[in-house]
Image: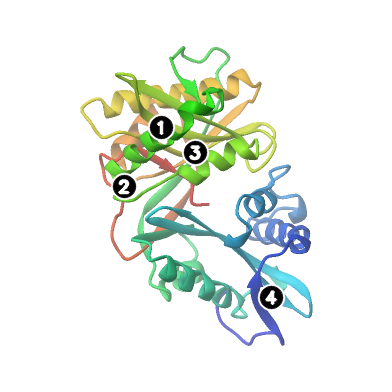
Amino acid sequence: MNEGNLPSEIVIRPMEPDDVDEADRVMRVAFGTYFGATEPETFFGDAEIVRTRFAIDPECAFVAENDRLVVGSIFVARWGSFSFLGPLTVRPDLWSRGIAKRLMEPVVDLFDRWQVRHSGLFTFAESVKHVGLYQRFGYWPQYLTAIMSKPVGAAPVECDYALFSDLPESQKSATLAACRDITDAIYDGLDLTQMITSVEQHRLGDTVLLYQHGEPAAFAVCHCGAGEAGSQNCHIKFGAVRPNATSRQLFEELLQACEALPHARGIERIEASINIGRHEAYRTMLDAGFRVSFNGVRMHRPNDVGFCRPNDFVIDDLT
């Protein structure tokens, strides 16, 4: 997925609605081939990563086109002062032909125009090609990121939480502002407003809220069921706890609330990504019964830890 001679007439352009089906097929085949699946086109099952991300923000998706055929794609997302890219996929018969490099170019340009403070990605730690590709664009390896999961318990721990979708419309703006205060206290300018509102708008799941002294003190954006997560999964896309003396306890309660949500919807499995640089959060998830199913590496531009510090109680999915 790195170097070599390009096929003729490679064009990198914004993704359009007519590209989505083929971009989805290419992504499944690329990942399925990499992991040695017997039927690569069915990789990811009924999870709809391409369709969901394009629907949420069509302007943040690009394709590589050759002879009017989509042969690769890349997605980006912006969380205020932080942006990330992925997945980046190329049709397997065109790997190592420079297409991935071409797909990276408009993304890095876009991040520079946005003037984001920090950007990142998740990739395969064992792949010299993947790590080398991203290093060429100024991304450097940080700590491992663990993809963790656990079965939803038959009787999750009872906890007191609210759902963003259940709030009166009159309260939602203030709640979004409170969530921005939480993330801004962790990393200057970090903002999940768009994700919270898009998950509700597209009915992809919900945002779990925990309160202290009448104000939101922790939240988690969860994809539940049909859509990006898959019908029997709840995926914590992002979770954060306000930094204070009770952060670890709040994080434990947030994990309990995130498990209660899929339990109420009859969903069997919950998963989340946690950077091991957030050592206390990682240990808390292990104590809560989460187990590592896959390790990858997080890469940052510029080369600093961002909000992956030992006492940052944050879950974020850059896959």
Name the image quarter holding residue 201: top right
Q: CA distance from mark 2 to mark 1?
A: 31 Å
Disc 3 or disc 4, which is closer to the eye?
3
In space, the residues marked 2 and 3 are separated at their CA atoms by: 15 Å
Label whose residue precedes the other's in the sequence (3 or 1): 1
Calculate the distance from the C-alpha at mark 3 to the C-alpha at mark 4: 31 Å
Task: State the residue at coordinates (57%, 78%).
Answer: 102
Q: How far is disc 2 from disc 4 in space, using C-alphas?
A: 35 Å
Which quarter of the figure has residue 300? bottom left
4 is higher (above) or lower (below) than 279: below
Question: Residue at (28%, 29%) from the top-left corner?
Answer: 247
- 171 in relation to 82, above or below: above
Cβ atoms at labels 1 and 4 below 8 Å apart: no
Screen quadrant of the N terminus: bottom right
Q: Which numbered tag is attached to residue 277?
A: 2
Residue under label 4, please give it. Answer: 94
Q: Nearer the viewer, residue 82 or 152?
A: 82
Q: Is residue 218 above or below residue 26?
A: above
Closer to the chain start, of discs 2 and 3, is 3
Q: Give the SS element for disc 2.
A: loop
Question: Most extreme residue toward the front, as rendered?
Answer: 170
Precedes in sequence: disc 2 or disc 1: 1
Alpha carbon distance from label 1 to label 4: 49 Å
Which label sits in the foreground, 3 or 1? Answer: 1
Decide which of tag 2 and tag 4 comes sooner along the chain. 4
Q: Earlier in the sequence, mark 1 or mark 4?
A: 4
User: Residue 19 location, x and y as percent?
Assistant: 75, 64
Q: In terms of secondary structure, where does tag 1 sit?
A: helix
Instruction: State the residue in front, 148 or 227.
Output: 227
Q: Are marks 2 and 1 in contact (CB under 8 Å)?
A: no
Q: Which residue is mark 3?
A: 272
